[in-house]
Amino acid sequence: MLISVDRPVVVEDLVQGDHTTLRPHAILAFHGFCLVEDSGDWFMGELNHDGSVFCWASYGPDLAEAIRGL
């Protein structure tokens, strides 16, 4: 399901031990998990109860690869 991009979305930055804010162009939701598209790359994450999204992995520009990762 395509959901609104008007929500906080961050990705975990393991190198810096912090989070980076994403500005998604699209968010696809799958039973609590999400695929977020930002600047041509797809990120996997989780839809939180407050509506925000926390991402932990990037699958690059290949949507099919990101879907397989679900």
Image (cartoon, helix red, strand yellow):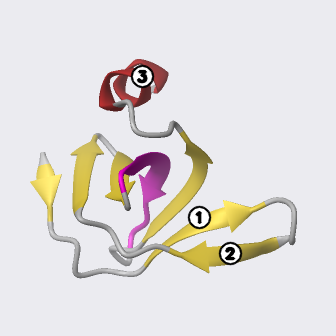
Q: Nearer the viewer, residue 28 or 26?
A: 26
Region in magenta: 40-49
Indicate the position of residue 49 as horizontal and vertical percent values.
Answer: 39, 69
Q: Earlier in the sequence, mark 2 or mark 3?
A: 2
Q: Earlier in the sequence, mark 3 or mark 1?
A: 1
Which quadrant would the C terminus be assigned to in this image?
top left
**Quarter of image, res 1:** top left
Return the mark for residue 65.
3
Return the mark for residue 19.
2
Q: Amino acid at mark 3?
A: Glu
Indicate the position of residue 18 as horizontal and vertical percent values.
Answer: 78, 76
- The reply to whether dot 3 and dot 1 touch (C-beta < 8 Å) is no
- The reply to whether dot 2 and dot 1 touch (C-beta < 8 Å) is yes
Disc 1 target residue: 11
Q: Residue furthest top?
A: 68
- How far is mark 2 from mark 1, CA to CA? 5 Å
Q: Amino acid at mark 1?
A: Val
Residue 14 among magenta residues: no
